[in-house]
Image: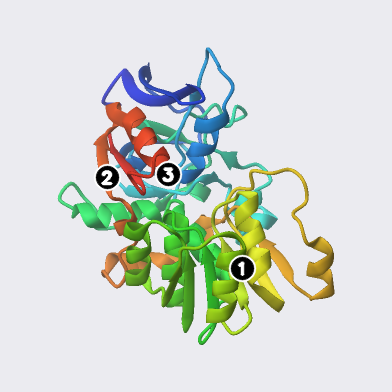
Amino acid sequence: MRLTITMRATFMYGAGEVRVIDSPDPSLREPTDALVRVTRTCICGSDLHPYHSMPASEAGAAMGHEFIGVVEEIGDEVSTVRVGDFVIAPFAISCGVCEFCRAGLQTSCVIGGFWGNPKFGTAGGQAQAVRVPLADGTLVPVPGVGPDTDEGLLASLLTLSDVYGTGWHAAVCGGVTAGSTVVVIGDGAVGLLAVLSARQLGAEQIVLMGRHPQRTELGREFGATDVVAERGEAGIAKVRELTGGGSLAVLEAVGHMPAYEQAFGVVRPGGVISRVGVPQYEAAPVGFGSLFRHNITLTGGPAPVRAYIERLLPGVLDGTVNPGRVFDRTLPIDEAAAGYAEMDDRSALKVMLRP
């Protein structure tokens, strides 16, 4: 039996206008659905893009794509999770059986999609409960997690729904291996976890381009060997000096054109620019001709975090890594609007919401 008839959920009604409202409690629609009671959710840096630019809307848009929780109800065809299981919900819905899911590219699932997608009729993850379509392919159960689980562990498990897997994707696509030199552009949660991932993969020199001291200090603790606060040509020159002429692996975790221009400026011939920041530009990035001339690879994209969870989960559970440290603010869900404002003015790195 579901716990509530209505629930609290976060909606955005236009640029800068976030409200937490009463919303109908979700229910199963398809036999492949599961209903998850949300334990923790959060605000993503990518949520700030509509926060800056979304046109006014009377209906509003359900927000959030990162959550963990407990399975409350399952459809008749769900077999991989049971009622009472603690689960991680990746930011992409995926079937688990199509050619792309089998190849570990769940973000290109032929019948999948993303939270808030009208074709599924799903709400966002910044809510007290979420209906999860294609539950067998989407949800990842985690044994041993219960009401008494340490808050720090819950935070780290929550990063596996997006930002840790996205940082890992940046490093994997960038070809980071033992002994690599790596440049990470951006000191947001994804950039910091790209640093952590590069260190886990054995990178020897990791240069973090960021200018917020609290964040870059965490970056150093995650494994950054150097921090460059300068931007533009000055930042490019500093990185090229530190790396002896540029890096073969450049991980861009911002999504704005100046960040791409930084990446283009510090990559070595034969190197890779791995982009995981959601691009906020439509035109082709500058330097395509030079990329070709210098055999530079441009790669990356939305991270198929579902493919990485089993690989990254053991280190989280045994405390080898603590990616949850990117959360520096926890608020009740009814204060989500304040969380958006704090992330927007950089007074918070990443805000966790407690339904």
Q: Name the amino acid type tagged 1.
A: Cys
In the rendering, at what x and y percent does residue 336 appear? 33, 31
Alpha carbon separation for disc pair 1 and 3: 22 Å
Alpha carbon separation for disc pair 1 and 2: 30 Å
In this rendering, would 134 be left or right of 27?
right
Task: Say which residue label 3 marks.
Answer: 66
In this rendering, would 323 be left or right of 63?
left
Residue at 71% in and 64% down: 298
The residue tagged with tag 3: helix, strand or loop? loop
Residue at 55% in and 66% down: 235
Q: Name the amino acid type tagged 3.
A: Glu
Alpha carbon separation for disc pair 3 and 2: 16 Å
In the rendering, at what x and y percent does residue 304 appear? 56, 56
- Please tell me which residue lies in front, 294 or 299: 294
Location of the C terminus by quadrant is top left
* Tag nearer the camera, 1 or 2: 2
* Tag nearer the camera, 3 or 2: 2
In the rendering, at what x and y percent does residue 353 appear? 30, 38
Mark 1 or mark 3: name the one nearer the start of the chain: 3
Task: Say which residue label 1 marks.
Answer: 173
Q: Which mark is residue 329?
A: 2
The residue tagged with tag 1: helix, strand or loop? helix
